[in-house]
Amino acid sequence: MDAVILEEKPDEGIYMMNGRPFMTDTKGRSVPLANVAPADKLEDETVRKIIRFARDLSAQIARFRDHTVADLNSFDALLAQEYGVFKGGRKGNRTYQTFDGLMKVQVQVADQIDFGPQLQIAKTLIDECLNEWSADSRPEIQAVVTRAFNTDKEGQINKTELFMLLRLDIPDQRWTRAMDAIRDSIRVTGSKQYVRFHVRETIEGTWMPITIDLAKA
């Protein structure tokens, strides 16, 4: 019996076995290339071609991001050396602009927020309020509460709706305690830095973003 010889071509999804080309199906089985439907093979080739470009572009964007951050950090270090202070506010947000005012780079730092066990206490107090209030008196508040404590697709509390509760002015002692509990539950677990790019044709013109997000291009 002849030995099995494999010659893989991962980029093409084809490998040689005993001198014959094969492809692997979704169940991990080796299928002779001759038995693969032309449409399936064309789809496979198309997806692999796109993925190759996507990987190259992703790597290029990663290098661009790293170079951008390094360049801005170097500039900040020069300013700090010259004036003894760093550019940016308390949270690290800062804007850089060309001399003619037609291009700018913005760095925005967003806090990553989680919630402690006090949030469950707040939910209990809010439920007490909703149960005592008549069902028809404040339906809009009940809708906000429902949305706030419903988890999203990632299983996370809806932060936007939860913060909307804090803006409601309701003269009920339990509600006030619930809002205090929500505030006490907020924990900043880290931060994420975003870099955005804008240009405009004239000083009076509207800033237009340079889009790097594929979904918004």
Image (cartoon, grey):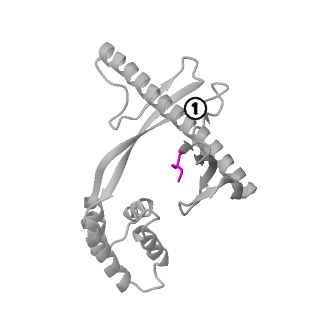
Give the number of callouts. 1
Question: Where is residue 98, by image quadrant?
Answer: top right
Work out whether residue 216 can be spotted: no
Q: Is residue 116 left or right of residue 201?
A: left
Q: Work out whether residue 73 or residue 119 is closer to the camera in this orientation and state it.
A: 73
User: Which residue shows up at 30% across the image and 22% down it?
Assistant: 85
Work out whether residue 96 can be spotted: yes
- Image quarter hosting the C terminus: top right
69 over 128 or under it: above or below: above
Q: x and y percent of residue 22 in the render?
A: 62, 52
Q: Is residue 203 left or right of residue 191?
A: right
Question: Where is residue 75, by image quadrant?
Answer: top left
Q: Is residue 116 left or right of residue 156?
A: left
In the picture of the structure, the residue carrying the numbered disc 1 is: 198
Q: Around disc 1, counting alpha carbons within 10 Å, would you say few (fewer than 14), some (14 to 19), or many (20 or more)?
A: some
Q: Work out whether residue 71 or residue 113 is closer to the camera in this orientation and state it.
A: 71
Q: Which residues are magenta?
A: 1-5
User: Which residue shows up at 64% across the image and 34% down it?
Assistant: 206
> Could you tell me what secondary structure mostly forms the magenta stretch?
loop
Q: x and y percent of residue 60 in the render?
A: 53, 31
Q: Work out whether residue 38 or residue 86 is closer to the camera in this orientation and state it.
A: 38
Is residue 22 on the magenta stretch?
Answer: no
User: Which residue shows up at 40% across the image and 35% down it?
Assistant: 93
User: Which residue shows up at 33% across the image and 24% down it?
Assistant: 86
- The residue most toward the front is 1
- The residue most toward the right is 38
Q: x and y percent of residue 148 in the render?
A: 42, 67
Residue type (three-letter) at the residue carrying disc 1: His
Q: x and y percent of residue 138 in the render?
A: 46, 78
Question: Where is residue 173, by image quadrant?
Answer: bottom left
